[in-house]
Structures are given as C-alpha cells and as structure tokens.
Amino acid sequence: MKFSKLLFAVFIVAGFATSSFGAETLADAFKNSKFKGELKTYYFDKEVENNSAKSADIISTGFVLSGVTDKFYGFGLGATFQSNYAPEVDREAKNAFNKDMYGSGAVLSESYLTYDLSNTGIKVGRQFISTPLVRGSGSRMVKESFQSATITNKDLSGTTIVGGYLDKFQGRTSGVMGETGGDAPQFGKKAIFLGLSGLTAYEFDGAYSLAIINKSIQNLTLIGQYVAVGDVTVGVNQSDIDIYYAEGKYLLPMDGYKLMLGVNHRGSKTDAPLHATKNYDGTYTAVKISLRDLAGFGANFVAATTSSDDGVIGGIGNAASSYMATMIRASSPTLTAGTDSFRLDVTYDFSAIGIKGLKGILQYGWTEQDRVGSAATSADYTSYAGSLKYAVPAVKGLTLSVQYETQEKATTAYASNTTTTVDTDELRFRASYKF
C-alpha cells in the first residue's frame, strides 16, 4: 500500500512537530481505551419461484467488538473484530447464501492508525468507509470493509473534504471474494462494483477518491464525489473506471412537519476494452421528496431514470448511495440502461401513540426498462415490502427487526414476443444487542 507508507512517514514527522494532547503517556492512551460490542442473531429465508437452487433459509450468530485508544501526540489506534457462525446449515443454504451470508469464522475488519491535527484527520489501515461512492454494506452478519488511507479536512467553513486511496476490500462472505470452504471473508485486491458485478468481486489495482460535502447555506447540503479505479479485471481484460456523483438536498422546516427535496446525478466512464464489450458509460438522475414528523407519519417518493443506451456503475461496495434501493432486493436493476424507476415509502413512528421504540415502513417500488439496442430481452421489476423495528425500552441496546419483500421480475423476449415472470419472496429477522 504505497500511499499509506507515504502517509505513515508524514505521521512521524508531524508527531514530532506537535505538542502532546490527549493522554499524557502511551500507557495512559491504552488504559483509557474505549470498547463497544454487539451480539447478533439473523434469520434469512428466501424463496425463488421454480428455482430450488436459490431457495433456502439460514440462521447465523456472531459478535462485533470494537476498540479505540485515547490520543497520544495526536495519534490513535482502532480495531474492529467481526465473527459469523452458521449452525445447522444445510447444503441448500450453503449454495443459496454462499455470496450473501453463509460462512463461519472471524475477521479483523478494522485495524487502523489515526492522526489528528487541528481540522485535519488521517486514518490508515483497514476501516469502514461511508461515502456516496465508497460504502460498505452492513446489512449482513459481516460488514464490508476496505484497506485504505483517508484524509479528512474541515478548514473551510461548513465544508468537509475527504480524500483517499484504497487497494483492498473485504466482502460479506468468502464466496463473494471468490474463495471456497465457507470461512470468514478475508481482504483481497478485488472489490464489488455496484451495478457491474452483482455478487462477484473483481480484481482491481487501487482506487483514488475525492469527496466534498458543503453545508454552509442553512438547510442546504451539497455533495460531490469522484472515484478513479485502475485496472479492473473483467474476464481476461483490464479497464480503468471513473465514477462521479453529485447531490443537492434542501430541508424545509414547516409548521408541524419537515419537507426535504433532493436531486442526485451520477455516472460512470470505462475505457477499452470494457467500453467495447459492456455498456457502462451512462448517467443516472433521481429526484426525491420526503415528508417527516407529521404526527408520527413520514413519506418518501423517488423517481429516477438511467440513460437509454448505457448503464451505470454505482460505486465500490454494496451500499454505494442510491435513492432507489428497495428494502431487501436493493438497487442494481435501477442502474441498468433504459430504465425508469419509482419508489414510494410510508413510515410511522409508534411513539406518537405511546409505543416507544417501535417504527414501521411500507414500501412499493417498480422499474420499467425499454429495449436497449438489439438486446434480446428487457426486464421490469415490481416490489412490495414492509418492516418493523423495535428498540426494546426495557433492555437498553436490544433491537429486534423483521423485514419482508416480494419482488416480481417480468422478462420480455422480443424474438418470441413473450413475457415470463419470476417471484422472489424474502423474509429477514434480526436480533441485536449493543453494549
């Protein structure tokens, strides 16, 4: 990791140039460390119509343990350990969830060195990242992570600038990373590229990122990010990929409720030979209207469109930002070429009627895809979903949640002028205790 070695040298020089703050001794820095943890049990059930290979259920248990030291001359250390264990898993579940949640073992997902000076922070090592175009999904037992060097600066009023370089990725399962045996996932020089790879991690040779978040105007948030990825290997060929993202959000505080308006525009560019064989040089534009805090109710309406001839690579990691992601089935279909997408959510906070900690959501999403060039098929998707989440007041840190989504995929074959449908039903239950 060449960039991290350079930054480490900068750390050493900077450390001698600063006065001590935080702990007075290195021993105190470790003595004053802070720890937190989480115990988790997840149950997932998936039923794909007429496809037993993708239909199964699985139960997994595990824990997360994180720790950070106190600062010493501006320096700090942090680590996060994740584990996953799938008891009584059968062959069907191993196959169906191989790239989703199956696996037993543990991984050191975070292990980093930090340095803070004034309004600048530097972090080098394994770490969780949450930016629009680089974001690890945490919806499974094992959260995605990156090996990276990042710099965050807040010198400009109301502005945060985040730069970084990453060269390794840790997926949800070992199956995603191309490994067999069902062990815990390990870091490798390959990554998920949302919209391109589905559940396959492709090899790459590092990625540079720059993001800017500006909140200098009251109630207005402006976000921009650019990512350049080198030598992504698809098949036997390697191609560079450029991804960009721009977003504006404006919150209107009204009398008794809040109204938020958002616009998101993104796109991707690929060089030869990926450009010659795949159509990923497209753009994607989405608008969102959100209503919040209206006697416990809330609502979201989102509409998006993708360029007619090219799809879009949405970012690195399964949680790369998307207005259109549905509760379980996610956002990949909305990034395909020639697709118009829509989603409607209705939320309710039951504390408005005295049930503290309980929140619910109902969701309806659909996509409509035109024929792209001379493509043999196109696909439309319709999803209905709902969830309940309960932060148990009597047991601080305990959260229970249940999600359900049914999705119909309608594929049109133009040669025969026929349409076939496949239904996928998924149920997820999660129990989590944080301490």
Image (cartoon, rainbow, N blue to C red):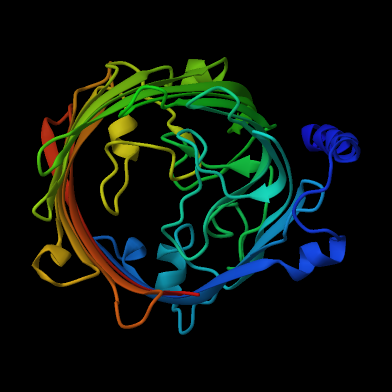
Residue 191, relative to residue 181: is it above or below? above
Q: Is residue 194 left or right of residue 296?
A: right
Q: Is residue 263 visible?
A: yes
**Pick the front one: 113 or 368:** 113
x%, y% of residue 265? 34, 21
Residue, x 47% and y 69% (percent of image)? 94
Residue 237 falls in which quadrant of the image? top right
**Pick the front one: 210 or 46:** 210
**Pick the front one: 137 or 336:** 137
Q: Is residue 435 left or right of residue 365?
A: right
Residue 100, relative to residue 275: is it above or below? below
Q: Is residue 83 visible?
A: no
Q: Is residue 169 left or right of residue 72?
A: left
Residue, x 52% and y 62% (percent of image)? 142
x%, y% of residue 301? 15, 36
Residue, x 78% and y 66% (percent of image)? 30
Count of numbered circles in the view: 0
Residue 376, relative to residue 8: is it above or below? above
Residue, x 10% and y 39% (percent of image)? 255
Residue 230 falls in which quadrant of the image? top right
x%, y% of residue 62? 52, 75
Residue 342 falls in which quadrant of the image? top left
- The N terminus lies in quadrant: top right
x%, y% of residue 41? 42, 76
